[in-house]
Amino acid sequence: MREKFAEALKAAMKSQDRRRISTLRLINAAINDRDILNRGAGKDPVPDEEIMQILVKMVRQREESAKAFEEGGRLELAEQERDEIAIIREFLPAQFGEAQVEQACRQVIDEVGAAGLRDMGRCMNALKEKFPGKMDFGKASGIVKTMLR
């Protein structure tokens, strides 16, 4: 993954795409911050699975910011956030559709042997482990909750 970011940054610098350069630098900074935290805790550098989680978190943050900017009438800043979201999503696997999320939730519930809401945490952990970066886990949580009732 790190190589992909480095290559994309080089290409963006050659084409002088300022938005892309700044977004890719933000991604690299977030990964480096996590690497530094891991090093301080005596752990290895961030693996690709954690990089996916970092990217998903960055997308979620930008979606919230874009919504806040829209509500505040700052449409140019909301558009800037959406541009960054599009760039970040290029590095994430294709997102599951609603039906695929429901199917994945049903599959995990069966595999875990979940019988009620007390098994919600186990189901969500299994989903995050099996499908990192492929779905919105906030929405998946609501689906799992409905299925377990």
Image: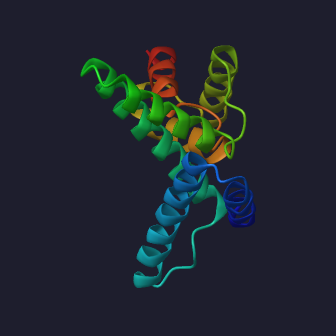
The residue positioned 57% from the left and 43% from the top of the image is 128
The residue positioned 63% from the left and 44% from the top of the image is 132
Q: Position of residue 83 (x, y in %)?
A: 54, 35
Q: Is residue 148 above or below residue 49?
A: above
Q: Position of residue 147 (x, y in %)?
A: 51, 16
Horizontal side of residue 25 vs 107, given as left or right: left
Q: Is residue 103 in view?
A: yes
The residue positioned 69% from the left and 20% from the top of the image is 103
Q: Is residue 38 above or below residue 118?
A: below
Q: Quadrant of the C terminus?
A: top left
Q: Is residue 133 in view?
A: no
Q: Quadrant of the N terminus?
A: bottom right
Find the residue positioned furthest to the left.
72
Q: Position of residue 60 (x, y in %)?
A: 44, 37
User: How many numbered circles are shown?
Assistant: 0
Between 10 and 34, the one lying in front of the other is 10
